[in-house]
Amino acid sequence: MEPRSFGVVADFGAPEALLHAAREMRQRGFAKLDALTPFPIHGMDEALGEKPSRLGFLVVFGGIAGFAAALLLQWWTAAVDYPLAIGGKPPFAFEFSIPITFELTVLFAAFTAVLGMLALNGLPRLYHPVFNYSRIAGATNDRFLLVVEGADLTRAEAALKELGAAHVEVVHE
C-alpha cells in the first residue's frame, strides 16, 4: 500500500522569496499553506491567510477569573467563614485585598496564556508529516520552507518551481 501524500514542501533561499511565493500561491488558489522559518518574517501571517489569534481574549478572561477568584476568596474567608473584629476594622475591606487580587490576576492570565498557546497550536505534537521532508533539519537554521497541504500536487509542484524554489519535494504521511 502506497503512503498517502500530505503535500508539497519547497525550499527558498531568502525570506523575501518565501514571502513572495506565499502570496503568489494564495492568489493561485492554494488555501492550506504553512511556512517554516528560523525567525519571524513580517507580513507572513497575511500572506498565508492566517486569522488573528484568539489568545488575547482567552488571556483577558483568565485575568478576570483570577481577579474574581482573589476577591471572592478574600471576602469569603474574612467576612463569612471566619470574621474577626479587630480594632474596628470592617470584616472585608477592598483596599487591603489589592495586592493579592493583582497577583492572582497576573497568575491566572499567565497560566491562561501558556496553556492557551499550547492548546491553540495543537502542542505538544510529537509527529507531523512535514518531518518526512529530506531537508527539514535546516528549517530551524538557514532554510525557508513553504508547505502546501492537500492540494493538486503536480500543479503545486510546478507553481513552486516557477516561483524560484531551490528544492521541491512531495511529502507523504
Image (tube, rainbow, N blue to C red):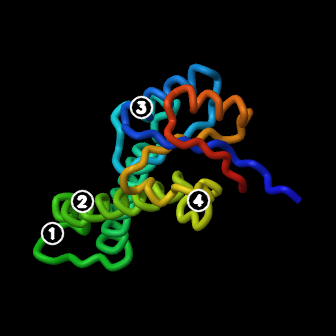
The tag earlier along the polypeptide, 1 or 3, is 3
Give the residue drawn at x 36%, y 69%.
73
Name the residue type under label 3.
Ala
Answer above or below: position of 32 versus 133: above
Considering the image in quadrants, where does the N terminus appear? bottom right
- Disc 1 marks a residue whose amino acid type is Lys
Q: Residue furthest left?
A: 87
Going from the N terminus, do you reach mark 4 or mark 1 first?
Answer: 1
Q: Are marks 2 and 1 in contact (CB under 8 Å)?
A: no
User: Residue beneath label 1, please?
Assistant: 89
What residue does disc 3 label? 17
Camera-side mark, 4 or 2: 4
Q: Nearer the viewer, mark 3 or mark 2?
A: 3
Q: Which mark is residue 131?
A: 4
Distance from disc 1 to disc 3, alpha carbons, whole Å, reads 68 Å
Residue under label 2? 102
